[in-house]
Image: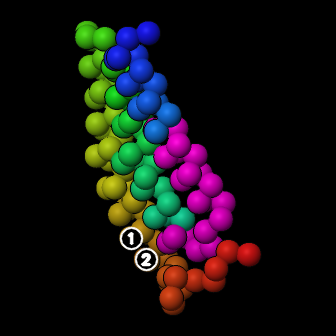
Amino acid sequence: MNAGHVLAVALLVCGCAALLLSALALTVLPTPYTRLHALAPATSLGVPLICLALALDAGGGRQAVKVLVIGALTAVSGPALTIVIGRVMARQGEEPAPGGGEPPA
């Protein structure tokens, strides 16, 4: 087991942890706007870390470049999609709860 493999496993664990925490937050948070904020770490941190780990484990070459492009596209498109979803919710009359909403039960 070399240092590159250990680093790939560490990045994979961190990426999976970010995805799991985002999924847990979706089940706990009360309002649609707070749930929308919970998705940000998944798209801007979780998926790119997993893609970086896969590219590092694949070594140099076309496969690593393909995985890195997927991670970069996800990291760039995630915040843009979040803005679009928020604007659609605002146009449909979904008002954010004052004070952040009710605390989870």
Residue 63 in view (yes/no): no
Q: Residues within 10 Å of mark 2 (few under 14, many from 20)?
A: few
Q: Name the amino acid type tagged 2.
A: Arg
Of the pair 4 and 36, the residue shown nearer to us: 4
Of the pair 56 and 86, the residue shown nearer to us: 56
The answer for how far apart the CA atoms under marks 1 and 2 are is 6 Å
**Residue 105, relative to residue 12: is it above or below?**
below
* Magenta region includes residue 33: yes
**Residue 87, relative to residue 57: is it above or below?**
below
Secondary structure found at label 1: helix
Secondary structure found at label 2: helix
Residue 79 in view (yes/no): yes
Q: Residue at x 67, y 74 (%)?
A: 104
Q: Which quarter of the figure is the N terminus placed in?
A: top left
Q: Which quarter of the figure is the C terminus placed in?
A: bottom right
Of the pair 86 and 69, the residue shown nearer to us: 69
Q: Residue 80: image x %, image y %? A: 32, 55
Please state the extent of the stretch shown in magenta in the rendering: 15-34
Q: Which mark is residue 91?
A: 2
Q: Residue at x 25, y 9 (%)?
A: 61
Residue linked to disc 1 = 87
**C-beta proximity under 8 Å, tags 1 and 2:** yes
